[in-house]
Amino acid sequence: MSDENKSPRDGVIDADVVIVGAGPAGLFQVFELGLLGIHAHVVDSLAHPGGQCTELYPDKPIYDIPALPVCGAQELVDRLLKQIEPFSPTLHLGQEVSEVRPLGDGRFLVRTAVDTCFHAKSIVIAAGLGSFQPRRLVLPGAEELENRAVHYRVRNASEFHGQRLVILGGGDSALDWVLDFHGKATSIVHVHRRPEFKAAPASVARMQRLANEGAVTYVEGVATALQLDGERLRAITIKRGDGSTVDFEADHVLAFFGLHPKLGPIADWGLELERKAIKVDTAKFQTTTPGIFAIGDINAYPGKKKLILSGFHEAALAAFAIAEHLNPAKKVHLQYTTTSPIMHKRLGVPD
Ligand SMILES: Cc1cc2nc3c(=O)[nH]c(=O)nc-3n(C[C@H](O)[C@H](O)[C@H](O)COP(=O)(O)OP(=O)(O)OC[C@H]3O[C@@H](n4cnc5c(N)ncnc54)[C@H](O)[C@@H]3O)c2cc1C
């Protein structure tokens, strides 16, 4: 899956369809469009495809996917990625779609937070519960220090080398960074609120070994205050399980409390919403703006059920509607994948 469809003009990408969201609905949308001969660009704010399945419950089994009596959530995503391979979608990961607006000629400008720009003839919003945002440290001063001394992701690891770090959290991200920065940071204090960790047991064991050796300070507790020196972070106060508090001097605090979905910029795209979901019709799954469709958990219509199955059905109908939207003069006939030579060709099935 490549980035080959960039238009030479100002780096703007001309697209028939931009799909916002690479969860199960967005991925299956690629497939349904591909069967009709339509290429799609897919944008997701996460660094990997899979939406809630990958982010929230990758190891859990799903029992209500037709013809798959049981399927792991990550396995489902892997199967979808395999299924869409013949259609070579262009994936733009790790970038939130921040802006969608009409260009006035029937197309839309779609812009991401890292300034990837599309001129899209149609858009499918498959944004689920919204884009995943880091859970933030709710302490006075944390907002002002964000990206300077309080961080929720590591963009450039080398900026933390030779620094005094306090790393908060008990999941894989927290543990991975504790282990990664060991030997590179001046000091590391690792803080987690309870004895149980979500991270891989092998990582926890390594961190505990480092703590026993005195290479990392481990504290069971919660952060209760940031101590500032003017506008600079000086220290962080940790309240231990027994109620006592301790201050650790720190240059940077890295908090990894997981991600939670937030509707985010979608609310500003001029679409009619109903309780944080986008209103669509049930024939085309089109929004109140012609050319913009919405499928999966993000949409609302009478009787809507937020199930993967529903997103798959909606993707199929939306694909036909998009084909008509792109080429109103051409009637799109239903063809079966079992028997259609043209679909076999698109799927790469030898006849
Ligand atoms: C614990 C749990 C168990 C579940 N079990 C089942 C089950 O057994 N069966 C079932 O059918 N369903 C189940 N579900 C529900 C199912 O996961 C959802 O219905 C499904 O994931 C919806 O798919 P989606 O593609 O619409 O959205 P999502 O999976 O939410 O994907 C949406 C994607 O859009 C991205 N996005 C959002 N906004 C933007 C933006 N502005 N720019 C770029 N990207 C954006 C997000 O980062 C995300 O990756 C479960 C859910 C949970 C939490």
Image: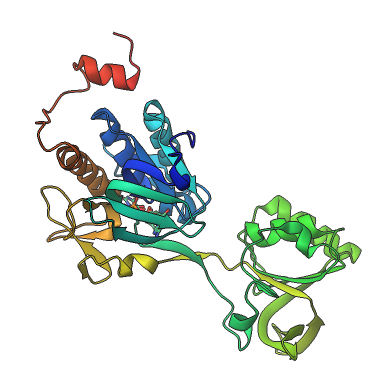
In the image: residue 187, left or right of residue 35:
right
Residue 36 as seen in the image, left or right of residue 80? left
Q: Quadrant of ligand 1?
A: bottom left
Observer able to see residue 95: yes
The C terminus lies in which quarter of the figure? Answer: top left
Q: State the colouring used for the structure image.
A: rainbow
- State the residue at coordinates (77%, 55%): 180
Residue 71 x, y percent position in the rendering: 39, 39
Q: Can residue 49 be seen in this view?
A: no
Residue occupying image coordinates x 69% and y 79%: 221
281 or 312: which is nearer to us? 281
Quarter residue 319 falls in:
top left
Foreground residue among 311 and 265: 265
Q: Which residue is at the far right?
A: 213
Residue drawn where x is 78% and y is 64% of the image: 160
Residue 314 place in picture, x, y as percent? 21, 46
Q: Is residue 183 left or right of residue 242?
A: right
Q: Residue furthest top?
A: 351
Q: In this view, does 327 lie above or below 183?
A: above
Task: Locate residue 209: give its quadrant.
Answer: bottom right
Q: Which of 42 and 216 is in front in this view?
A: 42
Q: Can you tell which quarter of the image residue 156 is in?
A: bottom right
From what the image shows, is residue 14 above or below residue 303?
Answer: above
Q: How many labels does the image show?
A: 0
Indicate whether 299 appears above or below 350: below
Which of the two residues, 329 or 20, is positioned nearer the viewer here? 329
Q: Which residue lies furthest to the front in this view?
A: 9
Give x and y (percent) for residue 115: 49, 56
